[in-house]
Amino acid sequence: MSEDPVASLSEVARTYGGVRVLDDVSLGFEPGVTAVVGPNGSGKSTLLRILVGSTEPTAGEVRYPGATGPKPIGYLPQRVPFRDGFTARETLAFYARLVDDDPDAALERVGLGDAGDRRVEALSGGMRRLLGIAQAVLGDPSLVVLDEPASGLDPGMRERAFRAAAERADGDTAVVVSSHALDLVDAHADRIVILSRGRVAAAGPLERLLEEHDAADATELYRAVTGAPGATAGDMDTAADDGEGGEESDDAEPDVHVTGVSDR
Amino acid sequence: MSGRLSGVATVFRRELATVVRTPGYGVLAVGLLVALGGLLAAGGGGATGFVPAVVDLLLPTEALVPLVAVVLGYRALLTDAASGELAVIRTYPVRVGEYVAGVLLARTVALVAVVGVPYAVIGVVVWLTAAPDTGIFATHSGVDSPLLYLRFLAFVLLLGAAYVSLAAAVSALAASRRSAIALGVLALVAGVLGGDLVLLRSLAAGASPTTVPVSIALAPNGAFRGLVFEHVIGVAFAPEGGFVATELAVGSLIGWTLLGVAVAGATLAFGRRVDAAIERVRAGIGD
């Protein structure tokens, strides 16, 4: 696995209305899975938006030394933004045409092969999020950035979403995932970035940081670094970040078989 | 297909599908047809021929077509920006110019359908019902002709395209649906009334009336009106012309269209940088 960063932030800062939400952030994102965690309002979504270029930093520099190809970056925002009125297949087909990819294969990859003809607005929150992940990895980008991919998903789908993301992280691909799901961070992340009040409180390989802080898992590490209680499987993913609303409830799951999820 | 054309075509298909699946636009077309039919019935021109029908429709058209065009365009670029989907689209190999071109082309095709079809239906009705005979295809003076109505329809679509483009620029500048509506109404009022008010003010200030054919062409509504007088109404009743400088008027309508495209493209391309620059200034003042 290459250790060259796919993307890097250098002394990045961002203010909104004069209020500093991100300050002096310098990070390198190497191939593998990097989890970005932190309390609500700590700047996770802003950091990810700056990383993908959808928000301009007010200071600092973003570079992509290892992000190559026709679509170097794949991005799933915190709120899955697809237009109503289109089916899942039509939605992916629009993006797939831009990078000569196969929408049906992308649907299969995230277990939505049977839901291709459902309209986006008829999908559950979790299925929309899986559709968003399928979109983000179209075109085989070197940098995949997923903002809360497990938000609003049931335990099976949360695992599936993280696993789908982690499977993309090969020798050349960096997957950056923000999440409150620290159990999934434990299971899938190679590196972790802990944000607190817009600053990097800790960053590096997960194993190393666990050792340095004498923590048994990511939850203990999170508590040690931020002083806040870590999220558990029961309360994760319900909160908003950076002032944005949370996802809708996933209680009313439609009667569509999601491949590889329902059997877990 | 080359990469750029492919990007434009892909965005165009998606946008056109969105328009087709929006029932409100069909209602808009029916509403326009009813309004035009009502105006024609009230004015009585349609029973006489194409040129009298154009005379009846000219003034309402100057308000109705911009209104329909603004309705078609005021959310064209806002929808993706507000939902966050534009941020996703921009991770794909589609340039801002290609995206704007695709969206605007689709909205212009929608305009041709929503505005062009009702006007065409009115034209067919006039052709079938008007007396005396209007079936003579000629453009020389004193003769009514379907060709004159086709010219009118072409000018209507040029006017509409300019307003669709300007409305799209508004949609790129707006931060929310509410502000898009407010800016759209402002653009509509400024476009429909602004040019004439400026012209009247300049005449009152002592400008020579001989400058009117030039100055009237500068605003989209003035350019449209001048072209209709010059090439539709005037052909039959005042063949000496002189209502407007034709090249300037056509150039003005195309220019307004391109201005809208340019503003929309620049807003999407540089908006984030401008936003960050404003934040830097704020931070500097705060420090």
Image (tube, rainbow, N blue to C red):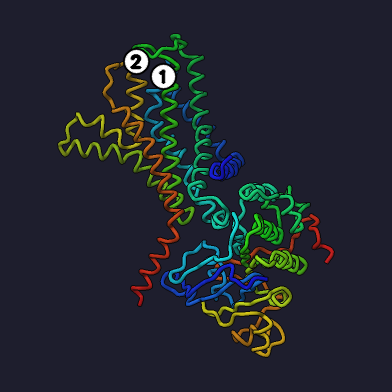
Q: Which chain does the residue under circle 1 lie in? A: B
Mark 1, residue position: B148
- Mark 1 → mark 2, Cα distance in angstroms: 9 Å
Q: Which of the two discs, 1 and 2, labels the residue nearer the N terminus?
A: 1
Residue at x 84%, y 64% (from the top left corner): A263
Residue at x 38%, y 65% (from the top left corner): B278
Q: Which chain does the residue under circle 2 lie in? A: B
- In this picture, residue B162 sits left or right of residue A124: left
User: Which x, y percent locates residue A178?
Assistant: 62, 71
Q: Amino acid at mark 1?
A: Leu
- Badge 2: how crowded within 10 Å, few (<14), some, or many (20+)? some
Q: Place residue A176 in its image quadrant.
A: bottom right
Q: Place residue A18 in its image quadrant.
A: bottom left
User: Which x, y percent locates residue B1?
Assistant: 59, 39
User: In the structure shown, which secondary structural element does the residue marked by tag 2 occupy?
Assistant: helix
Q: Is residue B76 visible?
A: no
